[in-house]
Image (spheres, grey):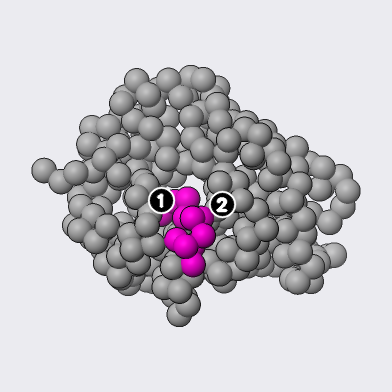
Amino acid sequence: MSDLSRCSLNTATVKHATLTEAVEAAASAGMGAVGLWRHQVQESGAGTARKIVEDAGLRVSSLCRGGFLTATSAEGIREAVADNERALIEAAEVGTSELVFVVGGLPGSAPEAPPSPGTDRDLVATRRRVADRLADLAPVAEKHGVRIVLEPLHPMFAADRAVVSTLGQALDLAAPFDARTVGVVVDTYHVWWDPALEAAIQRAGREGRIAGYQVCDWNLPFAPAALNSRGHVGDGYIDFATVSRWVAEAGYTGDVETEIFNEEIWAAPPAETAATVGARFAQHVLPHL
């Protein structure tokens, strides 16, 4: 039987399961961890969520998500900082040191929608505000022993979800801060295409900033919502052997989360999905770690 102790089920992969159902599915599949989302933690309370995970013999690999740091108004900035301060506390309370940040899109954008009147198209200034907000939040992260984990998203999401598109950009944003305070996650879905990926992963390893490795595949054709076009590892176009080897050679020894957004996979029984996640991890990822 394959060692799945580093395999983590991100609960987004079984979106319609309760927290208890998701944890039970991961434990039954032999995994060592789960990645949680804030709405689940808030529904049950951080203490209860932590107990559910620990009672199943698992650990929390990360909490999703903080971020959305691109507001321009004073009120919007205050709200973003306050929400992320709460997220950092929730991460500590639920038992993880890693809080994943999706930094946010252009101000005035909405997911998969045309620009609204007044949308701010200044991409350079928007990225500068992300850096400013990280400076606001880094002391809070350090205080609670939680690392801000920057997640670059594929460029097709730059308008509405994340103005940080490459691992190199994320590392540049992290550079002013201690690696224990601001790190990065390598998500294959978002970075597999990048011709500079190997060098960026090497840099992340040298700097001690790899805080997570997330896997899922790039499936075609796209679903009606591009965000929900992720697939099980091995069903699409990503070279998991190479990327996993690069991550391992960079010194990463932590959990490997499978995070899939896919309507068909969400409709499957959670235990079935977890079993597939474990099998694909063992076949396509584990041998190269």
Q: Disc 1 residue type?
A: Glu
Task: Find disc 1 in the rendering and name its residue.
Answer: 259
> With 79 as the anchor, is 240 left or right in this view?
left
Q: Is residue 61 above or below residue 58?
A: below
In the figure, residue 43 lies in which quadrant?
top right
Question: Residue under circle 2?
Answer: 179
Q: CA distance from mark 1 to mark 2?
A: 24 Å
The mark found on residue 272 in the picture is: none
Residue 12, x across and y down, in percent: 44, 44
- Image quarter (top left, top right, bottom left or bottom right) of the N terminus: top left
Region rendered in magenta: 203-213
Q: Quadrant of residue 144?
A: top right
Residue 68: x %, y % from top left: 68, 51
Amino acid type, mark 2:
Ala
Front in this rendered view, residue 268 or 199:
199
Reply above or below: 193 against 16. below
The residue located at (75%, 71%) in the rendering is: 124
The reply to whether residue 124 is in sight is: yes
Residue lying farthest left? 1
**Residue at 71% in and 41% down:** 139
Answer with mark 1 or mark 2, whichever residue precedes in sequence. Answer: 2
Q: Residue at x 51, y 42 (%)?
A: 98
Judging from the image, what secondary structure is the residue with disc 1 in? loop
* Badge 1 density bin: few <14, some 14–19, many ≥20, Cα 10 Å: many
Q: Would you say residue 16 is visible in this rendering?
A: no
- Between tags 1 and 2, which lies in front? 2
